[in-house]
Amino acid sequence: MTVVNDRNKNIVEEFRSNEGKVGGRFEGRTLLLLHTKGAKSQRERINPVAYIKDGDRFVVIASKGGAPTNPDWYYNILTNPMVTVEVGKDMFPARARIAEEPERTRLYNEMVKVMPGFDDYRRKTTRVIPVIMLTPVK
């Protein structure tokens, strides 16, 4: 069974209906659907997240809008790093890896260049916001 929380349900439906394009707060941004396995429940979870590309990797940031805690999906990938990614009409397996310094900062700054709101998120919190690299598995 797949779990999509109510807040994300409409975004996921719009994403799938429009080949990965959505409006609202994600309009004009690159967005993917990240499928993770719940760390505790082991149930599939789907979360829309903004991304940038770094070579063949997709880079996502566990910002949670600058909240003091990481998003739940971050803990899911720590427990189960094999994920599924939906981008546009494509769906594929990927391995998630947490970026370490100095790569974390470089990738975070690349995201800020494309989506400046991420700069606000890191200013709103005292935690180091994790950057995750999703490498497609062949």
Image: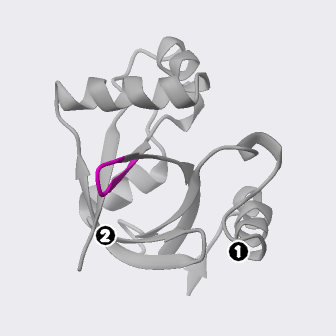
- The kind of secondary structure the magenta stretch mainly shows is strand
Q: Looking at the image, is 84 positioned above or below residue 8?
A: below
Q: Which residues are magenta?
A: 54-59
Where disc 2 sits, the SS reads: strand
Task: Identify whether 131 is placed above or below 59.
Answer: above
Position of 33 with respect to 103 (left or right) is right
User: What amino acid is labelled 2 in the image?
Assistant: Ala
Q: How many marks?
A: 2
Q: Is residue 58 above or below residue 137?
A: above
Quadrant of the rendering where the C terminus is positioned: bottom left
Q: Which residue is mark 1?
A: 16
First reached walking from the N terminus: tag 1 or tag 2? 1
Q: Residue at x 72, y 44 (%)?
A: 28
Residue 108 visible here: yes
Coordinates of residue 12 in the picture (x, y in percent): 70, 67
**Looking at the image, which is closer to me, 32 or 68?**
32
Residue in the image at 55% along x and 59% along y: 32
Apparent side of residue 70 relative to residue 10 in the rendered image (left or right): left
Q: Is residue 3 magenta?
A: no
The residue that label 2 is drawn on is 94
Please provide percent x and percent y for residue 73.
Answer: 45, 55
The quarter of the image holding the N terminus is bottom right
Q: Which mark is residue 40?
A: none
Find the residue positioned furthest to the left.
Answer: 101
Task: Answer with left or right where residue 47 lies relative to residue 102.
Answer: right
What is the x, y in percent for residue 77? 32, 59
Disc 1/disc 2 C-alpha distance (Å) = 19 Å
Q: Secondary structure at mark 1?
A: helix
Q: Relative to the observer, which residue lies in front, 6 or 136?
A: 136
